Image (cartoon, helix red, strand yellow):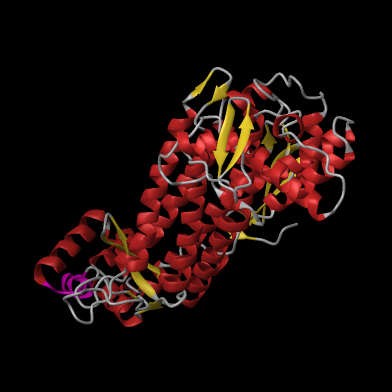
Amino acid sequence: MRITTDSMGDMPVPDDALWGASTERAVRNFPISGYTMPAALIRALGLIKLAAATVNEDLGRLTPEKSRLIQRAAREIADGLHLAQFPVDVFQSGSATSTNTNANEVIVARAAQLAVSAAGAAPELHPNDDVNLSQSSNDVIPSALHISVVQVLRADLAPALAAMASTLEAKSVEFAGIVKIGRTHLMDATPLTLGQEFSGYAAQLRKAGSRVERATAVLAELAIGGTAVGTGINAPPEFGTRVCRVLADETGFPFHEARNHFEAQGSRDDCVEVAGHLAAVAASLTKVANDIRLLASGPRAGLAELRLPATQPGSSIMPGKVNPVMSEMLVQVGLYVQALTHAVTACGREGHLELNATLPVMAHALHESIRCLANGARAFTEKCLVGLEADAERCEELTTRSLMLVTALTPTLGYDVAADVAKDALASGASLRAVVLSRGLMVEAALDRALDPITMTRSTTPASEVCGPAETTWENEGGHLKSRLSGVTGRKRTPPS
């Protein structure tokens, strides 16, 4: 152990730790869950400290020597090199001051190591006076939260959803010629093709991707520059704008200073909105997973229209049983994520006066949601969707036996007569065709044309024309993101103009 000092006095710290006294106090004060702050948020903190040092140097508030040391150490944190040096529990100060201080202390210690390795005269850095210059935990942590969530949404969740959508689109084309019976209320309905059914799933996933795009857009505003309560005390007036410019260059995303710092620090409504989008994504994934396990139920006593790839034995007692484990996994992910997003919504209500003091658990819930959704979507795509097969014969069998083909006779017979035909067929076990012909209600040729299931699937746009992705692009207009949806006209996809 070594002895370190902060404003509250001496504190023993492990010899191999880069953190200092204030971080050690937090480690000892909050032995709660064992969950540390999200790695992406720590990396975003490194970016903010790098950008702040750059701007403070440009504004003449920090010497070039100090700035460059801070930037080098902060760059390493942004690159994820020192994540083990951030041991503070998620359940800590609601502003995550301990995590901000942790970053400041690690940067100071690492900068000292870098200076020694350079064999030069090392300027002495102070975690508050130098690394935290022009900043407060109250504007740094909300900014790091926004940056980190944007980065994982773009790098992790968006590609996972796009891959799942593409796989569903490919299945929609593969299954385009397979006619099956539709179901509403879990009861027989009119026919559609399996391709059309899968085009709906593909469209859900494309919409989910668009929701991720909208979620990133609402996080473009950063609180940096507001310091303690939004007034910007102890920071130059242009500090926030300049830091955002550096961050935009570093990330390739149009981050900009908040229009109103009091809103940006007193509320977390943007994060609540993101949670809403994530809850919708979770609902979409759950719907697709549940439908696929229903359609694959069987193999002999269920619907059995789909055949699942065998991923593992399904039972410890029933040999040969294959369960829809990937669907079950994804459903559980959806339930978990919706609980996490509810926690974010509840946290959003806890903004009191000039600060929301639930930032650490909000960060944990958002990042955990994104991580599980992305991993769940990838695993489901790779281990279920790619190897999914259709049982065309089973689909044909169920379609032929369905009484709801009678719907196509309604324009000719009327609703009441058609309903009576269906009841008669159900009671007698005869086919619809036999009942209609025995009653002399239609001539045979016309009846066969009306009861052809494939004709009943062609009253809407073909699956091949609806399953392509709509593209949402975001443009920076006057410092604010504006969305534009291209490639969609009515119900059909058209090339972007």
Q: Is residue 103 above or below residue 200?
A: above
Residue at x 55% of width, y 67% of height: 166
Q: Nearer the viewer, residue 138 or 292?
A: 138
The residue stretch that appears in magenta: 429-440
Residue at x 68% of width, y 34% of height: 222
Residue 36 located left or right of residue 41:
left
Residue 165 located left or right of residue 183:
right
Q: Nearer the viewer, residue 3 or 450?
A: 3
Q: Is residue 142 visible?
A: no
Position of the C terminus, as image quadrant, is: bottom right
**What is the quadrant of residue 97 in the picture?**
top right
Is residue 435 part of the magenta span, yes or no?
yes
Is residue 463 part of the magenta span, yes or no?
no
**What is the quadrant of residue 188 in the picture?**
bottom left
Q: Nearer the viewer, residue 235 or 380?
A: 235
Q: Position of residue 72 (x, y in %)?
A: 78, 49
